[in-house]
Amino acid sequence: MARETDENIPLSSVNPQYLHANSTSHTWAFSAIAELIDNAYDPDVDAKHIWIDWTKIKDLDCLTFTDDGAGMDFDEMHKMLSFGFSDKQALEGCAPVGLYGNGFKSGTMFLGKDAIVFSKNRYSMIVGLLSQTYLAAIQAQNVSIVTFRKNEENNAIPQHRGSLKAILEHSLFQTEEQLLRELEIIKGLTGTRIIIWNLRSTTSGQIEFEFKEDIADIQIPYVDLTDEQKRPIQRPAGVAEFEFSLRAYCSILYLKPRMEILIRGKKVETQLVAKSLAHPIEDRHTPTFLNEPIKITFGYRTKSQGPYGVLMYYKNRLIRPYVLLGCQLKVNGRGIGVIGVIECNFLKPTHNNRNLMNQRSTGK
C-alpha cells in the first residue's frame, strides 16, 4: 500500500516540473496517444475496444480514452500515477509493449497539463487525479485517488475523503454525482476512462489539435514553424496522411491488431500493410549482431500516391513508419512506391522506448 499524508492522500514523487520534463521525451502528439492505446492493448488489461473522442467540459476541450479492459484497483491506480513501478508481463504469449510503466504519465502530460482517470474492476470503482495544475497549486507531490465501493450506494470509502475533496476542488468535476456519471460511461463491469484537459497549445493560445475538419478524426494542424506564434497554415500536398490524421496513424499502429480502435464513434479500418502489397517478396537479412535472419516483406503500394519506405514494428507495435532507406534517400526516382515491413523484436531498449516510437518518416 502507498504511504499517505495526514489527510489520507497517497504520497508519490510526481513533482509538476518533473511531469512536464518527462513528457518532453515525446516530440509528436500521436506517439503520446499511442502510449495510452498500448496500455489498453497490453495483455494484463486485454481490452477489446478503445474509444478515443473529443468533448467539451466547462467549455474546455478535452481528449477522452475509454476502454473495456480489466480495470484497476487502488494499488494498480497508484502505480500507474506514480513513478518507479512496472509489473507488466507477457500473458498467453502476448508481450506488453512498454517495459518501464512510464507511458501513461509521459503520454497524458504531453497531451495536456491535467488528467483524471476513472476505472472499474469487479469489486470497486476508482478515480485518480494526475494534474500539474493541482500539484503546482498545493506545492506538493501527492496523487489523489478515491475508491467507491460497488453495491453500497456507490459511496466513497471514508479513508479516501481527503483525496475526494482534492479531486472535487482541482478537477473538472465538483460533485460525487458527476464523478459517478463518468464511471457510468464505462458500460461494462470493468474498464477505464481517461479525460485530459488543458491541452497542448501554441504560443498564440490555439490548441494543437483540429476537431472540426473531419468529424470522425482528430488531426494535427500544419503550422508555420518560422512563425513565433506557430499559427496553422494550409497543409502542403506532400505531407503523408498518417502524420496529421490520428485515424490514418492508428490504421497502421499494430502489425496484427487484436483490439478495435474507435475514433469519435467510428471504427478504424486496419491496414494489414504486409498483406496488401502488390508483387510481394520476402527477403531475409542477418545483422552482424544476430545469429538468426530477420524476415522483411517488400512490395509495391497499391495506391498511385502515398508514403513509402519501411514500416518497423516492435512486439507487434509500430515504432517507425515509412523510413526511407538506400536508393529511396536519393533524388533519382528509384524505389518510389516500394514498401517494406519488418518486425524488430531483436531490439533491446537501454532506457525507454520513446526515442524509437517518436521517430517519423519524411517520405512523400
Image (cartoon, rainbow, N blue to C red):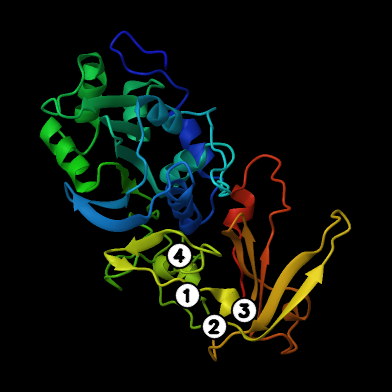
**Rendered image quadrant of residue 211:** bottom left
Q: Residue furthest top?
A: 6
The alpha-carbon separation of the residues under discs 3 and 2 comes to 7 Å
Q: Marks 1 and 3: CB-CB under 8 Å?
A: no
Q: Identify the residue position indicated by label 3 in the image.
A: 308
Residue 250: image tag? 4
Q: Marks 1 and 2: CB-CB under 8 Å?
A: yes
The residue carrying pointer 3 sits among few (fewer than 14), some (14 to 19) or many (20 or more) residues within 10 Å by Cα, namely many
Amino acid, disc 3: Tyr
Q: Marks 3 and 2: CB-CB under 8 Å?
A: yes
Amino acid, disc 2: Gly
Q: How many marks?
A: 4
**Rendered image quadrant of residue 179:** top left
Amino acid, disc 1: Glu
Q: Say which label, 1 or 3, has the lower sequence index.
A: 1
- For the residues carrying marks 4 and 1, which lies nearer the camera in this image? 4
The residue carrying pointer 2 sits among few (fewer than 14), some (14 to 19) or many (20 or more) residues within 10 Å by Cα, namely some
Q: Identify the residue position indicated by label 2 in the image.
A: 306
Q: Secondary structure at mark 2?
A: loop
